[in-house]
Image (cartoon, rainbow, N blue to C red):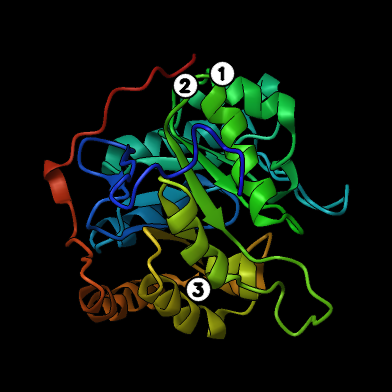
Amino acid sequence: MINAKLAAQSHVNHQTVVKLTEQVAFGGEEVIIIGGPCAVESLEQMEKVAEKLSAAPIQALRGGVYKPRTSPYAFQGMGEEGLAILTRVRSRYNMPIVTEVMSISQIEVVAAHVDMLQVGSRNMQNFDLLKALGQAGKPILLKRGLAATIEEFVMAAEYILSHGNPDVVLCERGIRSFDNYTRNVLDLGAVAALKQITHLPVIVDPSHAVGKRELIAPMAKAAVACGADGLIIECHPEPEKSVSDARQALSLEDMVNLVDSLKPVAAAVGRNISEAMGVGFKPAPIYCAA
């Protein structure tokens, strides 16, 4: 039994709904789709992404501006310049933004520009960061660690909840294995278990799990079939030219086609994927630092 006083499900119908905006909420009947590149590279890139995805049933954009990379010589992200790009694209295309925060010092500036703060797998047990995010005032997307047990994952969420933030969404993104054919092993059993253990919404990142674009579609369908509340998928205007994780990025056309193919799967398990939100969507105002 996991001793998670706040994250634990108290009864079978105990399900938290985490609102990203008034129109976009995790944990309801709709399967929420987040799409976008691994890293923000330019305004032109993000406008191409947003223009294509905003016309499809994709409810939010992702794009990293602070990038934790295995090599210190790899592209680390555009930082505050990237945040300015996200803010501009968010305003123009009326799509909420999800991006990663890596340290306590980044929380305030990132929260001023985006709708949801992501904790990457490498920071899942950065307990000081988790405590600080408990007071961030924004929904948190918490990714499972590279080799974290389900209990460790749930207790990481408990840190955020216990410090005052009830809006936590869990993300299964694959765990390490001896087999390197896929980047990681997508643990869909954990998704089903988390839906029983906790009341928190659970989404799946098939991109980081499999690491190969041709494997993403079947795993995305499997994730929806097993009860995931949403997906976060990498896509890029020119996948082969992506500055990070190029091998797993879908083209924008393939991204739109994938989401269309998920609709019958969602319907089969009593869920749905909405149509494009269009101009009726009005994001909450966000302060933009000068």
Answer with the quarter of the image where residue 229 lies: bottom left
Gap between marks 2 and 3 measured at Cα:
29 Å
**Mark 2 lies on residue:** 112
Q: Residue at x 61, y 46 (%)?
A: 2
* Percent x, y of residue 138: 44, 27
Q: Residue at x 39, y 17 (%)?
A: 287
Task: Please say if 74 is above or below 24.
Answer: below
Q: Which element is circle 1 on?
A: helix
Q: Residue at x 49, y 19 (%)?
A: 164
Gap between marks 1 and 3 measured at Cα:
31 Å
Between 54 and 28, which is closer to the camera in this rendering?
28
Q: Which element is circle 2 on?
A: loop
* Percent x, y of residue 54: 27, 55
Type of amino acid under label 2: Ala
**Mark 3 lies on residue:** 250
Q: Pointer 2 and pointer 1: residues touching (CB < 8 Å)?
A: yes
Gap between marks 2 and 1 measured at Cα:
6 Å
Q: Which element is circle 3 on?
A: strand
Q: Is residue 263 visible?
A: yes
**Residue 62 falls left or right of residue 52:** right
Characterize the local packing of mark 3: few (<14), some (14-19) or many (20 or more) Cα atoms within 10 angstroms.
many
Type of amino acid under label 1: Glu
Q: Earlier in the sequence, mark 1 or mark 3?
A: 1
Q: Pointer 1 and pointer 3: residues touching (CB < 8 Å)?
A: no
Type of amino acid under label 3: Leu
